[in-house]
Amino acid sequence: MQSGSGVWHCNFGQSEKATPGRFWKIGEYTALKNGGASLPFQNSDILGRKTTRGFVVEIPMEKGDNFYGFGLQFHGFNQTGRRRFLKVNSDPVTNTGESHAPVPFFVSSAGYGLLVDSFRYVTIYPGTASETGSSDQRRILIEIPNCQGVDLYFFEGPAMLDAVRRYNIFSGGGCLPPLWALGNWYRAYGGSDQNHVQKLADEFRQNEIPVDVLGLEPGWHSHSYSCSYLWNKNLFPEPETMVQKLSEKGFHVNLWEHVFVHPSSELYGDLASHCGDYEVWGGLVPDLADNTAQDIFSKYHGEKFVAKGITGFKLDECDNSDFKRSDWSFPELSSFPSGLDGEQMHSALGLLYQKTIEQAFRERGVRTLGQVRSSWALAANSPFVLYSDLYDHKQFIRALVNSGFSGLLWSPEVRACEDGEDLIRRVQTTVFSPQSLLNCWRIPNPPWFQTNTEKNLAGEEMDESTSITCIVKKFLTLRMSLIPYLYAAFFRYYTEGLPPLRALVLDYENDQPTHSVDDQYMLGDSLMIAPVFRGQPARDVVLPHGEWYDYWTYQKFDGSQTLHLDVPLETIPVFVKSGAILPLADPVQCVKENTIFNLTVYCFGSGAKEITLYEDDGISFDYESGRLNKLTISQNAAGETSVKRDGTESIRYNIREWKFIKE
Amino acid sequence: MQSGSGVWHCNFGQSEKATPGRFWKIGEYTALKNGGASLPFQNSDILGRKTTRGFVVEIPMEKGDNFYGFGLQFHGFNQTGRRRFLKVNSDPVTNTGESHAPVPFFVSSAGYGLLVDSFRYVTIYPGTASETGSSDQRRILIEIPNCQGVDLYFFEGPAMLDAVRRYNIFSGGGCLPPLWALGNWYRAYGGSDQNHVQKLADEFRQNEIPVDVLGLEPGWHSHSYSCSYLWNKNLFPEPETMVQKLSEKGFHVNLWEHVFVHPSSELYGDLASHCGDYEVWGGLVPDLADNTAQDIFSKYHGEKFVAKGITGFKLDECDNSDFKRSDWSFPELSSFPSGLDGEQMHSALGLLYQKTIEQAFRERGVRTLGQVRSSWALAANSPFVLYSDLYDHKQFIRALVNSGFSGLLWSPEVRACEDGEDLIRRVQTTVFSPQSLLNCWRIPNPPWFQTNTEKNLAGEEMDESTSITCIVKKFLTLRMSLIPYLYAAFFRYYTEGLPPLRALVLDYENDQPTHSVDDQYMLGDSLMIAPVFRGQPARDVVLPHGEWYDYWTYQKFDGSQTLHLDVPLETIPVFVKSGAILPLADPVQCVKENTIFNLTVYCFGSGAKEITLYEDDGISFDYESGRLNKLTISQNAAGETSVKRDGTESIRYNIREWKFIKE
């Protein structure tokens, strides 16, 4: 792992006791030097002052600076001039800055990133407001409420991507999911019982629908709002047998829950003195900022579930709510034994919850990848993917594109679908995302059988089911081919802080058209994805400089242009960067411990090129102590190929064939 | 005016310096007594504590208590269990409590009202949250941020309506609009010049479309964002002549503006040292909490406009914005010379602006009624009506129904219309509201000529224009018949604090079905209105106890039932309470100083009944010193009628005919 060099700390007033930095920062840093050459301003240019409302910081900027980030933003991309109110909100329906995972971190095109190290509802004005008499020479304004001072961390560029990478390394490096978690996920019908789940699993295998993870929704709990964390024995009389049987067929089981503890839970008594002073749905709100509460919660999950073969959790409802009636969440005026108040806990809860659950796995030496509804700053190394109940596809993609600025992973999960077209368009996006997920909690049959909920419940197959199934299967299968490539991308996330998914502007900052592209993104080193929405017969695709190959036809395009493409339903625009090596695996139905992937290695364009893949056990933390092979696949300028394997672990990848794409 | 008896003051910690109470309270009050019999709790039951975030107050409640109010709420009615975040927001698109005019005042069915005396973004949890270990025995929680203490005012019942009336009296009593302001308002096309406005006015008179007020939109300014407050001489070369000519035809002129002062304004220099430290649209934000700034702004308006015949203003854009790009408003971290910060100024600005403009009129002894986009607590005696850019008709009506809980007036103005049906449904509501307003700023021709904006701009008449015009004219004319009745209702608002428009639950608190009726309301003493929305062929109407007469057919209905009514386009369900006297005037085209209304007096049902009308000059403040006639019209139990005139002023009302409605 790189050191955290190029990170500068700046303090005003009295530091807050509980902050993301104090909880989770990893990297080293030095105090901000006067005249530091690498930031576009001097220490003395940064002004701080205490106000009645909290603390205000002002930072210089120039006209023309662009600002990106602020976490999982659904409604804006280039945030210049937009007031960003960074509050956790489960219903971010408008462009205020609120989100499931707002993050007080942004990058500036002036060549740096800035983390405001607080759990407060920070407001950031990046060129939004003009001081009276300033002749419109604006500054970045930051307001941190309810505090006596603030800590800031600046992350050097020179490029925005450099700043993002430093931020991710500072967070501990990106997470590395288990290999199986890069396959397809399917969350089963909420009314499922044990038999239904097993039947569904068998059908996937019979029909060769590749699925690695089956998720169970609230119904597995004996009481779910608040949670008992006990199996509902009516629906699941033999849960351990079920998990074991599914495991033998190569399925991982993921369990839904939230953090609010029902009186019938075995955790209730132990947590009663380690919780907030307000309940949620009659359940305790455990103070996960308190190590004891974290240990109690974590230990229970380890013993009751991880030890019995459960490999992940879906952490719901930790993202507050201002809209719902009555006690959907705890008030901001709450207090917790750890000293956090309700405002701070709302910001911290998602990530504290992730860390608590992760601990149950880490103690057993097993990796996990989970789902979560909320996160905050310094989350990069937490193995959880965000999701939402909101459902506009365009907004989902914008959130996806934004996620890479702030150390977040986001799943544009496939859920309700208008029709077959909508289903396909959404499947085409999810398979090209960090987590390929279908959430079918409302329907007993798969959506390719029937997209209409009522008819699905009635068991009525839709007319076009056969053709739709065929296309869906093609894309779920394609996902399996991408696993070695994606795993390599996550390794770079872990080692170099490079997000596996990035807005175009991060890779092509000097290409002016990328500055506002919120519906295309880079996935891994060399794939550029341009999702299509239902009802869209054609779309524009911005190609940055260089040369690009159509993923499907191998047609070559010059960069620095905008293509207008027809987008037939069977395809989604995907382009490969010239100069890339893309390893594609023969698809498997699921990833087992001993799965060996047969690779076809595609070399795009002329010139020297290289990719490094990683081979490890795919499930443990042994890679952290170097138990892995580095497999370097390259082609030199003369066109000669070579493969170099560094390490003595078992072989995971077997190169079967080479293909050379030039015209 | 009644004294403010039955109002109790309660203080915790250090009082805030700037609060609505310190600025605007009028009534007397006594300290909250221990064991006070009239409130449902003891002084010692109310708990207060300082927190990191501000101050928290807890108040007892019982299960089953209902809560109403919180200002101009668009998305909720019975607010029990709803977190209310009381922040001024120009785009209140979701049910958070935010609004153009949130008010930290509510009434409880337990028999009291409560004002939290602050300009802070107060959050109130009326039975929303359950304390850990409380066995779900909830309390009302109130959080006031960024303060060291708080002042509360409790308003005694026993009924909710009593509490509302005390609150309004405490605010100085309700406002009394000038008589002409109860006629119809029409805001002219934004691209209008002087000739267009005069032509429009002439057409109204020729076609007998009754209109009292013509409004000019931003185009009258030489610079409008920010404002110059100077006539655009290209469009309006002779504004004084225009205003005088319009006045001779009986039209009042209302001018649009906002509070942000452009450098080209004559006010700029004087206000430069009395403004906030951030600009809006390159304009100053005058510190209207500072008397000097208020005087400068007010004096200018008095001399330049009021003295020259302008009788009102539309005060736009004083309601913040979190959504819009760049400096749509000033940041909360702003500070003002008066000591208010940006948060407090956002809450206070609407009402400070109203008071400033009102002062220009009061100094000249002339009443006004204006429009405004924001308000706050203790606004009842401010002669301004709220409006919004949002436009859902159902939400408009809900806001109307809610407005009467908190001393606010709201206009469900007619603006863009889907089609002729939508136009008629909206006109049918606005004529039964405190301000009958058509805002046609986007269309050069009246909406009854063409509802489609593009076609209206192109001068293309819609097919059904003749029949639509006929219905619209019928309702605008009906409005003119209601003026004496409405003026009497406003007099009761002024003298007794009785809102002219009230949710059914205020008049019929013990009728359980009224507890959730958010689409019917009482207008004046005895009319109950049930608006209809486009596409609605029928609707349910809740009739409270007693007997009711259909306004149109005189058909009698027993109360305590819900009617299902067909609602043909020509009509809107209106019911008259049995036992009411309803005076209806022969309609006039506009209200002049010497207008005498010929009345038909309708007596509904049997038994003794009475109404008091008021005769004054309709334009000055002389009524405050008793220069008015009280005209008491009554019928005794034996059916004998009588009319008693108390006072020596000129006669305004002439009773032409009596009608007795019984079956």
Image (tube, coloured by chain):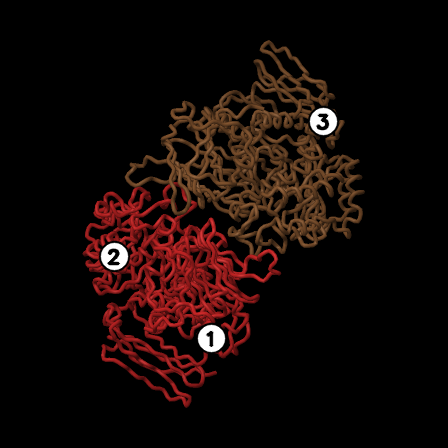
Chain colours: A brown, B red
Count of all numbered marks drawn on residues in the image? 3
Q: Taking B41 as reference, is B371 left or right? A: left
Question: Regarding mark 1 in the picture, which secondary structure is present there?
Answer: strand
Chain letter of the residue beneath label 3 in the structure image: A
Of badges 1 and 2, the one in the foreground is 1
Quadrant including the N terminus of chain B: bottom left
Task: From this view, report whether residue A168 is shown above or below residue A462.
Answer: above
Q: How far apart are marks 1 and 3 (CA)?
A: 80 Å
Location of mark 3 (residue): A617
Residue type at numbered disc 2: Gln
Q: Is residue B48 left or right of residue A435?
A: left
Do the residues at pointers 3 and 2 share their chain?
A: no
Left or right: A563 in relation to A459:
left
User: Which residue shows up at 36% across the image and 48% down it?
Assistant: B342
In the rendered image, residue B579, in percent from the top left (x then y), is placed at 43, 81
Q: Nearer the viewer, residue B153 or A612?
A: B153
- Residue A139: % across, % down: 37, 35
Query: Residue under circle 1?
Result: B550
Contact between labelled residues 2 and 3, with CB atoms less than 8 Å apart: no
Q: Where is residue B499 in the image (x, y as percent from the top left)?
A: 39, 69
Which amino acid, mark 1?
Asp
Q: What residue sits right under mark 2 in the picture?
A: B198
Using the rendered view, name the quadrant where residue B188 is placed: bottom left
